[in-house]
Image (cartoon, rainbow, N blue to C red):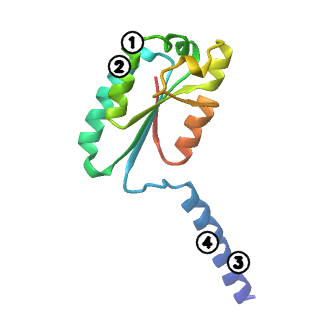
Amino acid sequence: MTHSIKYITILLFLILGTSQIKAQDHHADQYDYVVLSKNIKQLKPILMTAASLAEEDGENHGEFKVIFCGKTVSDMKNNPDFSKLLKQAKLQHVKVSACGLSLNKFSISPDDLPEILEVVDNGILYGFQLKKKGFISLTI
């Protein structure tokens, strides 16, 4: 009976320990960030923030991603100011994405968007998936 309790305790410890490891950040020594926004005009201050965090984090700075959802995707096509900021984002290693569901809702073809912009199927789901991977998230 004593052996059974020991084996059950060890088994529970292994199961619980394994589930906690899965939930932890895949880049435990890095800070990864994701910003979910409904306004492309916020890209400039987001890039300023990304630059400050990169400097502050030093070698521990990981990935920085921005996801735009909602009606703001309508403002992305043929927008020279936004395209300029996307080029700046690329130089800063910030990945900017548009929500595919939003593009569909507002009848915007991904072909009408700047090539630098990544399209994800579902921006909200993508944000949650990144959060589960340990990304520090902010919704604005």
Residue 103 percent coordinates (x, y): 62, 19
Earlier in the chain: of badge 4 and badge 3, it is: 3
Earlier in the chain: of badge 2 and badge 3, it is: 3
Residue 14 percent coordinates (x, y): 62, 72
Pair 4/1: label in front = 1
Query: Which residue type does callout 1 highlight?
Result: Pro
Determine which of the numbered discs, if any, sits on residue 8 in the image: 3
Determine which of the numbered discs, if any, sits on residue 13 in the image: 4
Disc 2: which residue: 84
- Between residue 88 and residue 32, name the one nearer to us: 88
Q: What element carries label 4?
A: helix
- Residue at the spot x=37%, y=51% of the render? 30
Query: Which residue type does callout 4 highlight?
Result: Phe
Label 4 to label 3, Cα distance in Å? Answer: 8 Å
Earlier in the chain: of badge 4 and badge 2, it is: 4
Q: Is residue 9 above or below residue 74?
A: below
Label 4 to label 2, Cα distance in Å? Answer: 52 Å
Pair 3/1: label in front = 1
Residue contact at pointers 2 and 1, CB within 8 angstroms: yes
